[in-house]
Amino acid sequence: MTDLERLTPKQFELFQSFIYQRSGIKLEISKITLVSNRIRRRLKAGNFQDFDAYYRFLTSRAGTGELSAFLDAITTNETFFFRTQSHFDWLKNEYLPELARAKSDGKRTASVRFWSAACSSGEEPYSIAMCLAESSVLLRGWDVQILGTDLSESALTAAREGVYKRRAMQEMDAARIRRHFSEEADELFRLKASVAQMVQFKHHNLLRPLNEPPFDCIWIRNVLIYFDRESKAKVVEHLVQSLVPGGYLVVGPSEGLYDMLTMLQKRTPFLYQKPKKDAS
Ligand SMILES: C[S@@+](CC[C@H](N)C(=O)[O-])C[C@H]1O[C@@H](n2cnc3c(N)ncnc32)[C@H](O)[C@@H]1O
């Protein structure tokens, strides 16, 4: 087997630790074939002779521009609209009415901020935006802000472009698709401006604090599965810092955070609330 076919365990270790430092993702040796295949694509794209030459470039000053494409090749950006329907049912049927009630009771102002942390190509924050658009009567006149962030520049470019294949719409019925998308050629669907303009996107690494005012509701789903506990703890610290008192954290089914959110109040298996100031 030549160098180009598969990483040696030693080469794997080098890439593994580089990936871990940059993203928090801890890839096990059992993933050596998968990782080799993914890195090989970057070798071909840049005409590198072997894994060692590529590693030297990637970790050099000259290789800074390659980092984003490398992490894109390694990470999984797979996502779709309304993934895990129960989370969106909670948003539409419980959270939005709760916000409207709090406003009419004089307990909050007419503004709300959402953060979709690790949003990939935008399906998650746009699904949040669709729920809000569909419930516009409840929050009429509100200042609504939805931020989507991700480590992957190419995912963010796709998110800003707002054009999707039918596969991303597997959880949406025809009426919802018609309402929010216009069909382009070849089974491609463009998100309408009414929803697209509700969401802003920004590059961000979950291992670092987000430099933004706090959010009322943060979504962290289908991203932490390959993070080790130390990295998860860092991410949790940053997320909790970014939540307002009384704010909610919506957690994906595979994050593995269940014993790491003790500073929050568990509301349902996927929903955690930061204590309100007067309750703490
Ligand atoms: C599978 S997608 C999840 C998308 C969406 N949240 C969902 O539930 O469908 C995982 C995303 O996490 C991003 N990601 C991985 N490590 C990250 C990090 N350290 N900081 C921010 N985003 C990261 C990847 O780029 C990828 O787009």
Image (cartoon, rainbow, N blue to C red):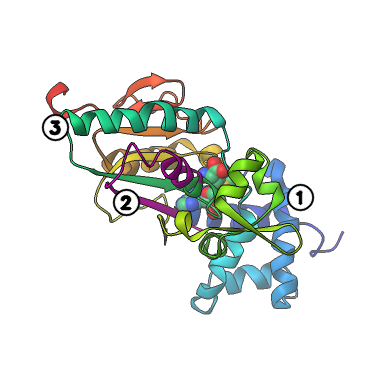
Question: Which quadrant does the N terminus fall into?
Answer: bottom right
Q: Is residue 134 a member of the stretch shown in magenta?
A: yes
Question: Magenta residues?
Answer: 127-151
What kind of residue is marked 1?
Thr
Ligand 1 is within 8 Å of the C-beta of the residue at disc 2: no
CA neighbours of label 1 inside 10 A, class few (<14), some (14 to 19), many (20+)? some
Q: Which mark is residue 33?
A: 1
CA neighbours of label 2 inside 10 A, class few (<14), some (14 to 19), many (20+)? some
Residue at the (25%, 46%) spot, across then down: 214
Mark 3 and mark 2 lie on one chain; the one further toward the N terminus is 3
- Mark 3 vs mark 2, CA separation in Å: 31 Å
x and y percent of residue 16 in the render? 59, 52
Compare residues 260 and 109 and report the one nearer the observer: 109
Q: Is residue 20 visible in the rendered structure shown here? A: no
Is 142 above or below relative to 88? below
Q: Which mark is residue 106?
A: 3
State yes or no: discs 3 and 1 in contact (Cβ < 8 Å).
Answer: no
State the residue position of label 2: 209
What kind of residue is marked 2?
Pro
Question: Which quadrant does the C terminus fall into?
Answer: top left
Q: Is residue 94 a member of the stretch shown in magenta?
A: no
Side of 13 where 115 appears, left or right: left
At mark 2, the secondary structure is: loop
Q: Is residue 254 visible in the rendered structure shown here? A: yes
Residue at the (33%, 29%) spot, across then down: 97
Compare residues 90 and 278 and report the one nearer the observer: 90
Mark 1 and mark 2 lie on one chain; the one further toward the N terminus is 1
Q: Nearer the viewer, mark 1 or mark 2?
A: 2
Specify the quadrant of the image occupied by residue 29. Answer: top right
| Count of numbered badges drawn on the protein | 3
Side of 211 where 256 appears, left or right: right
